[in-house]
Amino acid sequence: MRKINFLIAFLLISIPCYSQSEENQLCFDCHSDNTLTTERNGKTIPLFVNEKTFNNSIHSKIKCLDCHDDINPDEIPHPENLKKVNCSKCHETAVTHYERSLHGEAYRKGKYLAPSCETCHGKHDILSSKNSKSRTYVMNIPALCGKCHKEGTQVSKLSTVYERQALDDYSESIHGEGLFKRGLIVTAVCTSCHTSHDILPHENPLSSINKKNIATTCTQCHRQIEQVHTKVISGRLWEKEPHKIPICIDCHQPHKIRRVFYAESFPDEMCMKCHGQKDLTKVVNGKTLPLYVDYDQFKKSVHTDNSCFKCHTNVSFSNNPVCLNSGKVDCSICHQTQNEDYQISIHGVEHAKGNVNAPYCTSCHDTHNMQSKNSIPSPTFSRNVPELCAKCHRTGKNIAVSIDESNKGIITEYTESIHGKGLLQSGLLVTATCVDCHSSHRELPKSDQRSTVYKANIATTCAQCHLGVYEEFKKSIHSPEVSNTDKKLPVCNDCHFSHEINRTDQSDFRQQILNQCGKCHEEVTKTYFETFHGKVSKLGEQGAAKCSDCHGSHMILPTTNIESKLSRANIVETCKSCHPNSNRKFVGYLTHATHHNREKYPYLFYTFWFMTILLASTFLFFGTHTLLWLPRALREKRLKKKVNQENKAEPNGEQSTE
């Protein structure tokens, strides 16, 4: 122990300033030894701390000394027996509630079974309550509380029979069934009713389970339950005192809450006496609506285990018929998350405004013939989703006429895209459909920052399928994680578009690359088109190297980065993909070099102008010489012609004289 303390003292004295991780590392230099212990009250107490476990905990970002504040780093070795960590420094409200709770009161009295913070949360391995491995994760709460409160524990021996059976009763209750059998993390657990830290006896007026507070506690989950009860019992309450509404536990015993068999009062047979008649109709706003329900079809639907009453909750025996003015079905009773998403979506917002073209739940899922999305005939089966969305978004349909002109052909574009062909022609159900990009219920405009197709979210959306590409893109110069710039950085749909995505190995896409890159890299693109690669590409040569052939498609890196395709270590191999005989000398070719850039390529610049001036001067000199020589040449030609004519005429004259 002395050697370890001496080592800590040496490190702290020799290093005047530490980063957070370095400071913690000094502690781990000793406490990562699993044999490290201390003696306290005759007991051997381990001092080992698993570094990996701590670094994965919710406290990994804080220093050891932030919690163990009685350690003076200037006084090493520190005392072996440190005071207990004070959690209230960060968690003041939670500790205040704990201290006044049954647990805190028992702990102050020195009850050895009383839990402290570490009993439930742990010490150095504390995880977020949202982490499924955490002791305080909602699925693990009953087991955590059961360590003390289930039958057979030391605490249960000191409890009443009712308290001992609480956990067993909970397991058999509707709440327990929802949690353990169905995995519904929205169901109530111990902390939902008793709170996490402010656990008080029910006699205490501040307790969440006090008679006056029970209704408030239950309505955290069971909203509008008062209205439901009022309709069910028609205002006739079984009350001990006039005008006093009974509280939840008067009817629903705590921990033993069971299913309420309303179906016995409102059986399906009663509904089908009327709704089984094919000619049953209702007139709403001048329109005749059919009220017939094919019960056989309903029993084959995804809701086959539900009775009519579970959806049509607003029925009452005080009405004749019982479903009179019962209103629309509220799907959020079971599908709360989907309903919340729908409410903020463009569909939900428009529906709330009264837009008759805006889809509602039944527009996509049907009413009594609702099928699972895994069922092939279902409209929401992946292969059928494009056709489902096309009911409104196809050119000429009700929604298409009100959206922006550039998006009217989205269904046709999708059908001809690589995604559409993969789904509709190749039958690949793993390919992207409308809901994969726009989500199923949370469809938002691309201008909304919450949208899955908002520019900053596009890469993450595409990563649902193209994870490998996304991981490469995150490292590239185009990623906002790498480039801290105000300039526009490209995302997936800037190069691949949104609905008309083509195969990357097709000629049209390869030719389009030059235009896409040229939108941002205009000057570089101009220089490219002056090279051999660029000129033959203009002529339509598909095999000529395009931008992505040299720079890469998604992991585009600066040439100074060793992983870049154009780094000194990789450039020869990059060129070899087209030029098998490439070597170090060959790759010295300046790809984008241009004689227009005097600063970057001075030799090329001056050589170009020297040769240009030389060529122009040569042509000018000899051109002038030729022009000046031309009159004399013509005159000489005429004289020569005249002499020749005279020489031919002179012998003929002599003969005539004789």
Image (cartoon, grey):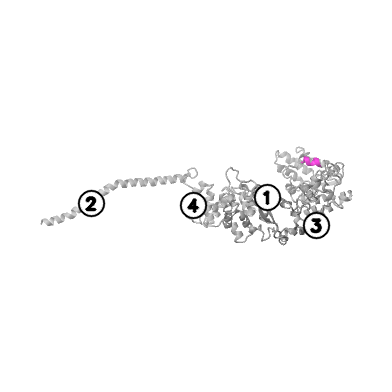
Element type where label 4 sits in the image: helix
Query: Alpha carbon of mark 1 to alpha carbon of mark 2: how far?
Result: 103 Å
Q: Which residue is mark 2?
A: 640
Q: Position of residue 146 (x, y in %)?
A: 83, 51
Query: Alpha carbon of mark 2 to alpha carbon of mark 3: how far?
Result: 132 Å
Q: Earlier in the sequence, mark 4 or mark 2?
A: 4
Q: Which quadrant of the rendered structure holds the N terminus? A: top right
Q: Earlier in the sequence, mark 2 or mark 3?
A: 3
Label 4 close to label 3 by CB (< 8 Å): no
Say what amino acid the circle numbered 4 marks. Gly
Say what amino acid the circle numbered 1 marks. Tyr
Q: Earlier in the sequence, mark 4 or mark 3?
A: 3
Question: Which disc is residue 264 wearing?
Answer: 3
* Residue 654 belongs to the span the image colors magenta: no
Between circles 4 and 1, the one closer to the viewer is: 1
Q: Which residue is mark 4?
A: 534
Q: Position of residue 358 (x, y in %)?
A: 64, 51
Q: Which residues are magenta?
A: 91-97
User: In the image, 472: left or right of 246?
Assistant: left
Say what amino acid the circle numbered 2 marks. Lys
Q: Position of residue 657 (x, y in %)?
A: 11, 55
